[in-house]
Image (spheres, rainbow, N blue to C red):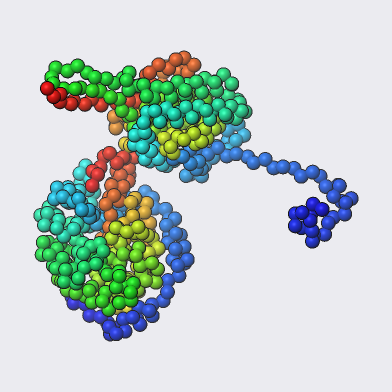
Amino acid sequence: MTATAPIGLSDLRTHLYGLPGVDKVGVEARAAALATRSVKTSAKTKAIDLAIRMVDLTTLEGADTPGKVRALCAKGMRPDPADPSCPSVGAICVYPAMVPVAAAALAGSGVHLASVATAFPSGQAPLEVKLADTRAAVAAGADEIDMVISRGAFLAGDYRKVFDEIVAVKEACGAAHLKVILETGELATYDNIRRASWLAMLAGADFIKTSTGKVAVNATLPITLVMLEAVRDFRDVHGRQVGVKPAGGIKNTKDAIKYLVLINETVGDDWLDPAWFRFGASSLLNDLLMQRTKLTTGHYSGPDYFTLD
Amino acid sequence: MAARVAGTAWRRTLPKSTKAMEPAPVRLSVRKTYKLYIGGKFPRSESGRTFVVDGDNVALASRKDARDAVVAARAAQPGWAGATAYNRGQVLYRVAEMLEARRDEFAALGVPADEVDAAIDRLVWYAGWSDKIAQVTGGANPVAGPFFNISAPEPTGVVAVVAPAGLLGLVSVIAPAVVTGNTTVVLAAGPQVAVTLAEVFATSDVPGGVVNILTGKYAETAPWLASHADVNALDLTGVEQRELAGELERAAAGTLKRVIRPSAGGTDFTADPGLRPMTTLLETKTVWHPKGY
């Protein structure tokens, strides 16, 4: 699907500035209120399994080796080797150089393979480099691409440039899903986050993602709430559903369940599915597994019983 | 004149006669709620429950408080074990100093002066052992090969303790565990004394999470700690019912914990404890190092 802007590009700025402002106090209070919900027993069991299926198990380090990526893939396919009823994660997320290794390891498993591209994490590279980065990852076997927007251009008000880049990367993706990382920690205001969400969706994003995990402020509940409202409103207007992926800083089961509650209360069941919601995380999976073990065995588990990565 | 000083001179002053008839104001005392001690803080129980002991409100710990305490103890363990033995000894000595300064509080709780003395002495005794225990329990082993073979004691990790009542008993189970670098989750019997001791720990440079103290009914929380996979040892010294001690030991076997059984006739804490309380909570690491010629 090639992205066709439903509005004239010259109207882009007008359109983005026409979006209503975000009530900062209101959105934070609502996110905090929803975070107090208590999810227990059988509902908790279901929530944990759903959260595991939503995890994009991620390793994005300079020190990544083929061995580490293979180990991560093995873990993603069978998160709890002791329990075959434990579901696989949604996807494995790696750097483009590691895609061939991960593709071989994941072949036939049904676990998706995501790769960051477009000069992740800064996005400060010429467009041709970003496109080549994307094509290489897709050619090597990635079926999901996590791109970063040019925050510099966005903050400078050059929305057209950001829009065109997303359109071009979307085209380079071919059949692969495109997740657009807004890097909300660098966008400074909720209004900017709402605008960037709309900009990405208008340009053809299949997913909007909060963060790279490489800056100080990562995914938070209020930011995700703003983005969920954006995808809901976008579907109402344009009839196309877009997924959401909070990433970075989601470390334990309690946090993950808060996000699930947020989805249920904001956009509803339609997004409570790994096809439409993902967690970009690494350490979250171990905590989910510990909580799952607690529910199945009846006693508390410990980090010693799960792999480090 | 006083009103003028206080900046309220504009107020209509009452006639002198009325003022003389007012009763002297009664000062309301601040009543204390004895709370838990987890990760260096004094939270109420997560469950919101309290119970009354001798007219005092005391937090009644739940299994989730025990879980939180284990998380705090685990987080504190590498740092505490990584501190130098000398440093841990100094911190324990500091605990003794602070306990000395709080004599009156313990006296008010009915702890006899000689028990406070004994508890302080016990702390100082263990503080002294911090940088000596490794020489006694470790050493170079003669082996038939070209190797240096060295054994050194290492802390077991997170120790769950069902503590006996009384200040001396409490100190006698906590000090030998922490002096070697373990961290503890203590289920305390005499809550006021235990929480007052927690205040001593909180003011003596003991890092948060090294000692965690939970008040309440140990029969409720101990089984969760016994089966907890992230607890490495279980000290049952304070368990009075044999049957419960057996159950806890069986639960602990699931994760191969070290278990200290309660002694049949009760423990005499005034006697010389010997090294057993420390050595039980140590693991021996042996290193083989090739020797050059």
Which residue shows up at 23% across the image and 25% down it? Answer: B286
**Residue furthest out toward the front:** B293
**Which one is nearer the viewer's eye here, B167 or A155?**
A155
Relative horizontal placement of residue B85, taking residue B62 as reference (left or right): left
Q: Which residue is at a point 86% across and 47% down the rendered structure image?
A: B20
Image coords of residue B41 (percent x, y): 48, 41
Q: Residue furthest right?
A: B17
Q: Quadrant of the C terminus of chain B?
A: top left
In the image, taking residue B38 as reference, residue A182 lies left or right, namely left
Query: Going by the image, does B246 lie left or right of B217?
Result: left
Q: Is residue B52 something one can see in this rendering?
A: yes
B212 to the left or right of A300: right
Q: Is residue A4 above or below residue A287?
A: below
Q: Quadrant of residue A187?
A: bottom left
Res. B265 in view: no
Q: Residue A148: where, in percent of width, then height?
A: 25, 66
Please determine whether, in this image, residue A226 is positioned above or below residue B12.
below
Q: Residue at x 25, y 26 (%)?
A: B285
Residue B66, given in percent of the width and then of the height, sits at 42, 38
Residue B265 vertical position relative to residue A84 in the rendered view, above or below:
above
Q: In the image, residue B254 lies at what x, y percent? A: 29, 32
Tally the marks: 0
Q: Image quadrant of residue B153?
A: top left
Instruction: Identify which residue is drawn at 41% across, 24% down.
Output: B176
A160 or A289, which is in the foreground?
Answer: A160
